[in-house]
Image (cartoon, grey):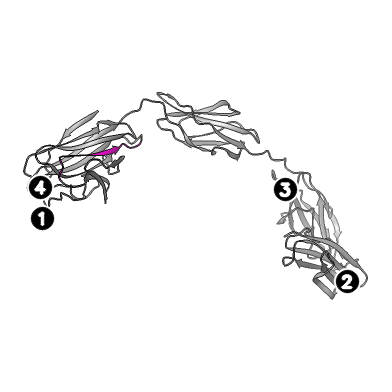
Amino acid sequence: MFLTRTVCLLLLLSVAGTVLARSNFRAYSGAPGTLGSCASSCHGQSNGTVEITGFPESYVPDSTYLITIAAVSGQSINNFNASVRVGTGSTNAGTLSNGANVSTYNVAQETNGVHFSTNNHTSGTFNWLAPAEGTGTVRLYAGSFQGTNENSGQNSEFVLVAEEDVIEAPPGLATNPSPPDSAVDVPVMNTLLAWTAANRANSYEIFIGLEDAYWSIGSTTATNITIPDVLNYAADYVWRVDPTNDFGTTTGTTWHFSTEAELPPLPDQVANPSPANGAQNVPVTLTLVSWGAANGAESYQIYWGLTSTPDYLGAIPMTNFVMTNDLLFDTMYYWRINSVNQAGVTEGALWSFRTEAQSALGDQPLAIEFVVSPAYPNPFNSSVHIALSVPVADRITALIYDRLGRAVATLADNQPFASGITLLSWNAQAHAAGTYFLRVESSHNAHTQRLIYLP
């Protein structure tokens, strides 16, 4: 319903000094929060009447209304200012746009105002796009001035109220699904579904299914719900949200997601340690610690130390690691190997062994025979390490050869080595990927092994 509303109120503002007519001033409509004057003088003397029509008593959200301002008696309208605000506050309600003889303007505290494009018209029009649903009551504020100077014409001020229409229709659609449409690797347990609220919805019925065979998983007034059941692994699901209000139910958009692949079972526990659990008199020159492969394991976590809560050293894909330093005499060592795969970690048993008592020859460990340990790691991606066990002082040569038999690196060149355990290392980052050969020679022995460099 549209109203014709006429207001003929004098604006009683006292201004020191000369008072200007402000007939072309980009000013304020008189809405809450604005500062300044309307497009009118405060000293009009002649009679006159201005009407504003087309602003509804109740508005439909997101609808456009043509509003007219006109002088129905007295002189033409020199100029006017108007804006529309939410409630009794200063927030703009909807959007004003140009019409006949009218243009929009933007100044501080009046960021969507309208006034005459040029002065002195008997009428003008402008458009109001009503705000979105849920805005509530809005007010049109306007001030006008009829006359040609500060001492003639009528000042008028308007405040028109419009209530939001209740739309007697089912709600709109829920949007912005989470998981997003076509999402993958969605968890199968405690899966949360969420969405953006639908216009006019009071509650939501949620459906989920396989191959469009839907079943309800409940209703809620919230915009999310946790699926009460555990979903199938590696399955394609469809789901939808049906918004509901007093006027009906809207069938929601069909969304899709795929669940995560099923994880393998946890790996078995590691067994068959070397040195054996509880072993005694283990040589302090121990070079290699190993264990049996655990079924389902992809890597192994190493724990090692002198207490029953050994320290974490790292994870490796192999079932052995090289000791780079001699052990302590007559000392209890504790260690544990955890097996790991995508499903998680299986903690290994705590093992221990005691090393031999101190040798009568002193603190220096003696090797029994000349041994070159397997390179570690191998294949490798930067550096590789090789432990040498030297029984008596000797001169050692250690060279790296490529596949064409060319020496590409020297680790030792007829170098004297004391008896005991020595660690050699080679950093291959300056070389091309591929297969290389390590050749180690002593006075009485020679050893060759293949190395694979994978940067």
Q: Which mark is residue 16?
A: 1
Label 3, label 2: how far apart the Cα atoms are:
43 Å
**Residue at the image position 82 percent from the left and 59 percent from the top:** 288
Picture coordinates of residue 383, whole percent (x, y)? 74, 64
Mark 4 vs mark 3, foreground winner is 4
For mark 4, what is the residue?
148
Q: Is residue 283 left or right of residue 33?
A: right
Select label 4 or label 1 by which is in front.
4
Q: State the residue in front, 220 or 175.
A: 175
Residue type at mark 4 is Thr
Mark 2, residue position: 361
**Residue 308 falls in image quadrant:** bottom right
Farthest-out residue, top: 247
Compared to residue 125, the image places residue 350 above or below, namely below
Residue 109 percent coordinates (x, y): 26, 49
Q: Please state which amino acid type lies under the numbered disc 2.
A: Leu
What separation in Å lies between label 4 and label 3 (alpha carbons)? 90 Å
Q: CA distance from mark 3 to mark 1?
A: 87 Å
Q: Sequence order check: which comes first, mark 1 or mark 2?
A: 1
Residues rendered magenta in the picture: 120-132
Kindly identify the amino acid type of the residue bearing the numbered disc 3: Val
Residue at point 61% right, 28% down?
211
Among the 4 quarters of the image, the one containing residue 121: top left
x and y percent of residue 14 in the render? 11, 50
The quarter of the picture where residue 234 lies is top right
Mark drawn on residue 340: 3
49 to the left or right of 202: left
Closer to viewer: mark 1 or mark 2: 1
